[in-house]
Amino acid sequence: MLNIVVLVSGGGTNLQALIDAQNSGKIKNGKITCVISSKEDAYALERAKNNSIKTITLLRKNYENVAQYSQAMLEVLQKEKADLVVYAGFMTILDETITKAFPNRMMNVHPSLIPSFCGKGFYGLRVHQSVIDSGVKITGATVHFVTEVCDGGPIILQKAVEVKDNDTPEILQKRVMEQAEWQILPKAVNLFCEGKLTVKNNKVFINE
């Protein structure tokens, strides 16, 4: 049974999707053993506590720079014996100290079809506003492995979502979460825990 550690900063809707998948048996050979938040008031912490999952608060403001925060995070992840680290709305930057320690063992869900609308500055409602402004008809979500390149790691799963003419960023965000993020993140986590993901030349192969 693999130890899954989830990193959060906010409401924790993606965390809830993982918890629901775990409770319904959709995540095999893995268990969420700890949730770590970069903010003390993140509602995601309540979601974890409601499901008897250990929580740790590691506040970014308590550290002078990214390097110090990353080192502290690495020590916590190692202490928790993390086999897989999942970014679920984690809005704090970590440096290569973390990615080098967990190669192809950290994954993130991003609210667009990478390589579109991603990279530095593309997060939250900014992504969806950019999608609407561009006039594209299809957006979606991507689960990828985390590397030192922002949103640049190997892509595990993607799912497309329609963009409608009367969409606001908030409406589109909700549709992308419901139709894509909450579906492909638990699926990707399960594939990892079942040992079905192989990375070659920056591409992910699913071994069904």
Image (cartoon, rainbow, N blue to C red):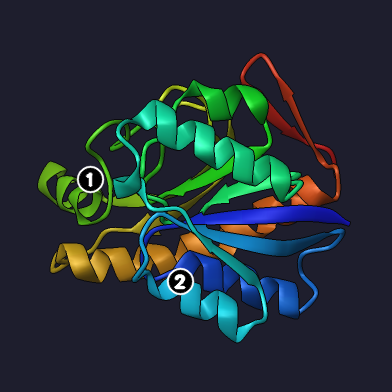
Specify the farthest residue to the top. 201
Q: Nearer the viewer, residue 163 or 198?
A: 198
Q: Position of residue 157 (x, y in %)?
A: 59, 44
- Left or right, 158 with respect to 41, comes to right
Residue 151 visible somewhere in the drawing = no
**Quarter of the figure with the C terminus:** top right
Q: Dividing the image into 4 quarters, which one contains the N terminus?
A: bottom right
- Vertical comparison of 16 with 76: above or below: below
**2 or 1: mark nearer the eye:** 2
Q: CA distance from mark 2 to mark 1?
A: 32 Å
What type is the residue that disc 2 sits on? Ala
Q: Residue 140 location, x and y as percent? A: 40, 52
Residue 81, disc = none
Q: Earlier in the sequence, mark 2 or mark 1?
A: 2
- Count of picture labels: 2
Give the percent coordinates (x, y) of residue 175.
Answer: 35, 69
Circle 1: is it few (<14), some (14-19), or many (20+) Cα within 10 Å?
few
Give the camera-side residue of 106 and 75: 75
Position above or below: 63 against 89: above
Q: Pointer 2: what residue?
A: 44
State the SS at label 1: loop
- At 87% from the left and 58% from the top, the residue drawn is 29
> The disc labelled 1 sits on which kind of residue?
Val
Q: Quadrant of residue 66?
A: top left
**Labelled pair 2, 1 in contact (Cβ < 8 Å):** no
Tag 2's secondary structure?
A: helix
- Say whether residue 188 is visible: yes
Q: Which residue is mark 1?
A: 136
